Image (tube, coloured by chain):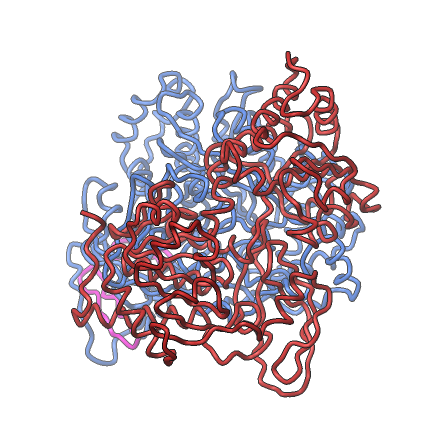
Chain colours: A red, B blue
Amino acid sequence: MAESVAVKEPYVMTGVVCPYCGVTCDDLEVRVENGKITDVKNACVLGKDTFLHHLEGLSTPRLYGKPATIDECIDAAAGILAKAKYPLIYGLDSTELGAQRASIELADLIGANIDHTSSVCHAPSYQAVMTVGIPTCTSGETKNRADLVIFWGCNPAEAHPRHATRYSVTPKGMFTPKGKKDRMVIQVDVRPTPTTRIADAFIQMKPNSDYEVISALRALVKGHELEQTEIGGIAVDELKALVEKMKSCKFGIVYWGMGLTQTRGKYLNLVALLKLAQDLNEFTKFSCAAMRGHGNVVGMAQVLTWQTGYPFHVNMSRGYPRFNPGEFSVVDLLARKEVDAALIVAGDAIGNFPGSLAEHLRSIPLIAIDPKESDTTKVADIVIPSAQGAIGAGGMAYRMDHIPLMFKKVVESPYPSDREIIDRIIAKVKAMKSRGNGAPAPAGRG
Amino acid sequence: MGRSLKIIGGEVYDPANGIDGAIKEICVEDGKVVQSCTGPAEVIDATNLVVMPGGVDIHTHIGSPAVNAARGFRPEDHRHVHFSKKPGLRSGVGSTVPSTFATGYLYAQMGYTTVMEGANAPIGVRHTHEELIDTPIVDKGLYIELGSNEFILKFIKAGEMEKVKRYVAWLIRSLKAYGVKLVNPGGVEQWKYGKDVKNLDDKVHYFDVTPRQILKALAWANESLGLPHSIHLHANSLGTPNNYLTTLDTMQTLEGSRLHVAHAQFHSYGGENWGGFCSKAAEIAEYINTHPNITTDIGQIVFGDATTITADGPWQYRLYKLSKNKWYNQDIEVESGCGIVPYTYRENNFVNSLQWAIGLELFLLIRDPWQVFLSTDHPNGGPFYLYPWIIRLLMDKPFRDEMLKRVHKRVMPETILKALDREYTLYEIAIISRAGPARALGLKHKGHLGVGADADITIYSKDSDKEQMFEHPVYVIKAGETVLRDGEIVHSPDGKTLFVVPPDVGEMDPTFKTEFENYYTIRYQNFPIDIEDIPNREAIPVGDPR
């Protein structure tokens, strides 16, 4: 368990795990003076900001816009959730496993829809894996072995700043003793980005042509000739040269981002890419991996999978888990205005969703559990502040490659953790149901 | 806890204590079997019922990063089987890779109370513990996969055997693991560059050591640490024709040392290629019959859907090419890997049908039931909850013959199954499904009903249809509490995580931290798992060095 720290003396914690992105660096050194983080070593600018500004923009407990106690907020939240017929639980990326686990228990209890931010980022990646599988590896394999690294539709230099130095570009590993010199780094994207500077080669394609380009690469890998001279704005000769590099490397990997998942083709882009990587294993060792973003979003998919069988878009309204993209995915649920109450945990739904969806969220009872003020807390009926995961609360978290690590509790927070809040809501809902107060939710929509 | 219970009038099968169907009273207090109850006790009248210790599964894959990857990429596997929430019970999904809560319920419904998760890369063990915590009712432990661990390969190459031992002890202590697993030793490392090892003397790239050296080193380390279970081996060349030679070579290499050969069915094949695929069960059984140092579980296949999940990456790639099903592969830094391919075993497929027969031949040819245990290598050979069907095949010769007629017609001339008249007795079933695995695991308080044993007890009604009998226990008692009555789960305690505390054989070298951080991508200090992260647990003591 994370060490709890009550001493007033300044202290430095080492091996601290950063909650910002899916690189999940675990080598931070955090200095705390008088309950405030005053210095962070080893972190990138995003991680450093997260820790240093931990006391800024904190949310406060509120009930319908008026100050309230945490207890009052929890009671009111439980009342709403116990009565709701088709509630939604959403967010859950920026918190630790215990809170994620509790949120599923709550969903099971009240027959809720439960979804998380994968729904609007890498769900298409998962859907592709469900379709064809994936050859992948942990980041350490890239560090130890990869002599060809391709970044496709992602921009780690800005979104995952330490990916390149910890895993994919510069680190020296078992079979890559010269680090960067032992690796060829290629970027494929629709425009140059700061990642272009760390790549040895940049291949520019026309927007929305990933599927065609990847399919052409597959054809070339299989030895077919192409009639075209260019595909997606890339000369076929350039594609041929890329295929040669892919087939002749010892250990290749493609990292992809939302440039593939959220553009034309969506999960089909990934089906093509994953098949390409599988095909290449005829010739050499080849892997691919998603550049996952928000903190512990992988953890939510993990625990949801082991408890319900499905990684996202889960509906419990019939008393058992059902999964259906398009039906139980958060965007579709909100677009159809089906949900009649929402609990948003550690995520900003209002700030990230299109206006019409946010509009529906505003029109129903909305509960937000969040350490910080956000667009969601600003309009929520109930705001329950919590101790921020990885800063004020410890617990488990997953890296983008599914490696589990432990968030440490770095400072004390005046507020309970997300997990404790949800556990208390669960206890309250159970008590209400056993009293017959707030009748149990009828199964589904009839 | 604190509850007293008397089971009276039952026909007791407790092979560890030599009890073969005697009518005997079993008394339970504070979760343990006692000589007699000190106060008033609840009475279960087991007249005309069969009483056995709770089942013990020595080899299953129920929760790990690999199992969860399989669940996540097989939504089609879950849709048709669901578990509704009930008071005190969580909802879930079933089929070949059930969700965790469902897994606990399914094992309990079959009368099993202790299960061992079969293969875990050390860096993912933190995840496995979380899944095991969410697997209710049963007690559980996990093995760590070390057969291609790069530190071990390096230590062996340098001839530093003491370091191998210290490292194994450090891993088990840091990870709260139960035992040492090897999967295709050396071959998993080779797969990281897309290759495999061909035999026990094939050198592993760069490290320059052979599977034979790895086997010997880890068996020696395991035994000299006095770990309760022997090394648990998924041998080289799984699933391929003529692999029985490798299996025999492997067993001969470790002659004199304890060895558990996992899923032997997948390692007992002859023939130069798939065209000549044939059974070598008799050869493997003969070796085991003359070598009491060996235990095995069969990895019996059952017809229908399965999900193959193994660290044996090169085999899974071959299975992907053979089956053309979807393929998941994850290589894991420094340690291991995992491959997943959905698979369906078909009665009308010659190879599948012969695999089915080979498993049964092994069960029937291995004479001492204390050496052979029930498993499907879940979910590789099929799901664990079909064990009752296998039990019926073992106990019921006419049923077996009927089945033999149904499978692919080329199997009949290829198997000696027809000539094997042996039918397992209830006493023998109690050995292969409880007493034997518990003894092989070194779990002294499991798998029997003697005084001091954990009160994990299953009560069946007699039925000439043995599948019915074992599928539907009347009572299941876990640690003295009734968890199942008349087929319904009535109580769902958490169950404990069983782990081994190895002896102190010295710290790792001061340079190890640097080595660790050179090749891993996490900090050395973040590798060990805090014991407090496992709320319900029990440390199992080690024995003397062997």
Residue at 38%, 41% in the rendered image: A325
Look at the image and tell me whether residue B289 can be seen.
no
- Work out which quarter of the rendered image holds the C terminus of chain B and state it: bottom right
Q: Residue furthest bottom?
A: A8
* Residue A345 sits above or below residue A193 on the image: below
Figure quadrant of residue A236: top right
Residue at 58%, 62% in the rendered image: A19
Of residue B351 and residue A142, the one placed in the foreground of this image is A142
* Residue A54 sits above or below residue A175 on the image: below
Figure quadrant of residue B87: bottom left
Residue B144 placed where, x, y %? 57, 53
The overriding secondary structure of the stretch rendered in magenta is strand
Of residue B505 and residue B420, the one placed in the foreground of this image is B505
- Is B7 one of the magenta-colored residues? yes
Of residue A405 and residue B320, the one placed in the foreground of this image is A405
* Residue B240 sits above or below residue A228 on the image: below
Residue at 82%, 46% in the rendered image: A177
Give the number of marks. Answer: 0
- Is A202 one of the magenta-colored residues? no
Judge left or right: residue B236 versus residue B159: left
Residue A138 placed where, x, y %? 63, 47
Residue B498 placed where, x, y %? 47, 63
The stretch of residues the image draws in magenta is B1-29
Of residue A397 and residue B268, the one placed in the foreground of this image is A397
- Work out which quarter of the rendered image holds the N terminus of chain B and state it: bottom left
Residue A345 placed where, x, y %? 43, 63
Look at the image and tell me whether residue B4 can be seen.
yes
